[in-house]
Amino acid sequence: MLKELLHPISLAILLLASASCSDDGTGPADSTDIGSWMEFYEVPGVSVAVIKDFALDYVAVHGVKSLATREPVTEQTLFQAASISKAVSAVGAMRLVQQGQIALDTDINDYLTSWQLPHNDLQDTEKVTLRRLLSHTAGTTVHGFRGYRYGESVPTLIQILEGAPPSNSAPIIVDREPGSGFQYSGGGYVLMQLALMDITGDAFPDLMRDLVFQPIGMDQSTFEQPLPESWLNAASTGYYASGQAVPGGHHIYPEMAAAGLWTTPADLAQLLIELQLSLRGESNSVLSRESVQLLLTAVSDNYALGFGVWSQSGEPYFGHGGANDGFRCNMVAHRSDGFGVVVMTNSDNGSDLADAVVRLIGDREGWPGY
């Protein structure tokens, strides 16, 4: 789960790293071709969406979504977004904040009706709040999740929170004082997922569809887990670094807000564009300008509310990466100048590829720092 482990500042350093490519093993002989990078890193399939002038400029696809069928990746091919799910979930949560259904700085237990976060002395003076959950400063545990194979029993959300069978992760608790610093916690996003469901009475996939996907036009995105049969034909197969397919093609993630999004680069690009336009006061399909400014304001360690935010060559960027078994992805956008890129791959080797593609696109387009 490399990308999830990186703080945004580390991500920025990676993006600034040299992309020199030669015959010495540091990269393909043709460093200007995405297909060459894909071959070099042994990634079966990749899809790339490029943003320019606050609009989707183009989508480039390479390779296959399944080595068994040799079916090619298309613009409609679905990938697991992994921890990019957190950024999308944060947008939905902020819309409920904007609507007055939840407050950023109220004890999250005040909103939970189906379960309560266990209290301990670390919470005597400082509380677990939505702001802290979204910014990984709530002091909650469980970094990430490995998902469930087809045929395995899939736990309920409360079983995941309690670490009870058949959950394969530890209980989600508070092990440091809320607000005391950054501690990446997919577990915190599971807690947030339950709170939003308790507040609205809606299933999480339906909630995100209504709050985010439909208003923006992200019609190739879903948080449904397992993926409905009607969507399976569009889904890519995930591959381990060895080239072996993930059993069943992919894992199931009931931890939807943390890792459960299926989507395309084009849909994620539409989300980034919407946020860019909102910051200019030119769109409020989901969030107002003030809400997006709050969403992208750093809280700790260059992490805002669901997004990494950083400065590169003095220019402001935001984005997120993701890593599930068999899938790696990355999205980067400029805060004010209307450009960006989303890269999604179906391989555990895809982290390096995604970084290389971001640098390649940035160099082609003349982005500051690339």
Image (tube, grey):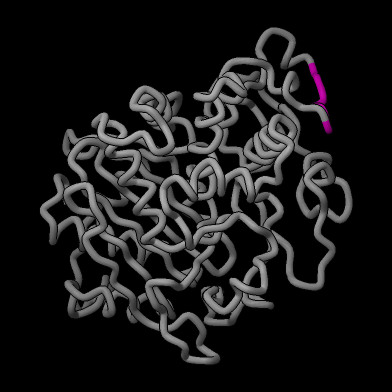
Percent x, y of residue 255:
68, 49
Name the one closer to the observer, 99 or 349: 99
Left or right relative to 336: residue 218: right
Picture residue at 18% right of the left edge, 65% below the top: 20
Instruction: Answer above or below: position of 82 versus 274.
Output: below
The quadrant of the rendering that contains the N terminus is bottom right
Percent x, y of residue 150:
75, 72
Count of picture labels? 0
Indicate whether residue 321 is drawn in magenta: no
Residue 275 quadrant:
top left
Picture residue at 26% right of the left edge, 57% below the top: 56
Left or right relative to 339: residue 260: right
- Residue occupying the far bottom of the picture: 69
Percent x, y of residue 314:
17, 33
Q: Is residue 144 visible?
A: no
Name the one closer to the observer, 273 or 336: 273
Picture residue at 43% right of the left edge, 68% below the top: 345
Picture residue at 50% right of the left edge, 24% below the top: 98
Name the one closer to the observer, 233 or 45: 233
Instruction: Answer above or below: position of 278 versus 350.
Output: above
- Main secondary structure of the magenta stretch: loop
- Residue occupying the far right of the picture: 165
Q: Is residue 46 visible?
A: yes
State the extent of the magenta-drawn residues as a range: 114-120
